[in-house]
Image (cartoon, helix red, strand yellow):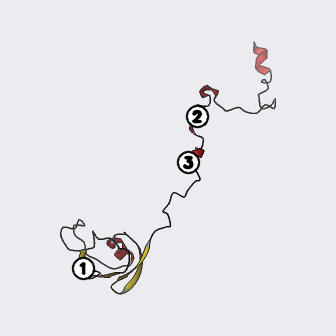
Amino acid sequence: AWEYAFMPPPQSNIARGRGLDTSLHLFGNAFKDAFSNDNSLGDKENAGLKGGPKFNEVTINGKPVKAVVNQKVSQVANAARVKITYSCKKGDCGTCTIGMNGRMVKACQEKIPAGKCTIETF
């Protein structure tokens, strides 16, 4: 038995030219069918926003700022480096009251509307 220790190993499938087979025949076509594309869904569409975000030109204390419609006023003011004082950030206290399009609103709760928007802080 000691003479077998010095013999070269038998040729592998790769050395014989058959290549390496890594497929699992255990599951048949179950995984192949589960992960194949469903052609009945039609053409692939972009998963992002259709037409992109809607932008609005906002004026904060006379400074023009570009903002996304339905973005929080607090975020737009922060990006424009306009300081608004906040306390509760729930809309209960009224510390963040600003003027928006002639109305008094709370900056922590209000969102940028579509159309003209003028904001005045106090």
What amino acid type should be assigned to the residue bearing mark 2?
Phe
10 Å crowding of disc 1: few (<14), some (14-19), many (20+): few
CB atoms at circles 1 and 3 under 8 Å apart?
no
Q: Distance between the residues labelled 1 and 2?
A: 60 Å
The quadrant of the rendering that contains the C terminus is bottom left
10 Å crowding of disc 3: few (<14), some (14-19), many (20+): few
What amino acid type should be assigned to the residue bearing mark 3?
Leu
Of callouts 2 and 3, which one flags the residue occurring earlier in the amino acid sequence? 2
Query: Is 90 displayed left or right of 46 in the figure?
Result: left
Q: Mark 1 points at which residue?
A: 103
Query: Comparing marks 1 and 3, which lies closer to the viewer?
Result: 3
**In the current view of this chain or complex, which residue is farthest to the top?**
1
Of callouts 1 and 2, which one flags the residue occurring earlier in the amino acid sequence? 2
Q: In the structure shown, which secondary structural element does the residue marked by tag 1 occupy?
A: strand
Query: Is 1 displayed left or right of 119 in the figure?
Result: right
Q: Distance between the residues labelled 2 and 3?
A: 20 Å
- What residue is drawn where x is 73% and y is 33%? 20
Please tell me which residue lies in front, 19 or 31: 31
Residue 10, x across and y down, in percent: 78, 23
Query: Is 52 displayed left or right of 40 in the figure?
Result: left
What amino acid type should be assigned to the residue bearing mark 1?
Arg
Q: Name the residue under label 2.
A: 31
**In the current view of this chain or complex, which residue is farthest to the left?**
93
Q: Vertically, is 59 above or below 112?
A: below
The quadrant of the rendering that contains the N terminus is top right
- What residue is drawn where x is 20% and y is 74%? 95
Q: Name the residue under label 3.
A: 41
Residue 79, x across and y down, in percent: 39, 75
CB atoms at circles 2 and 3 under 8 Å apart?
no
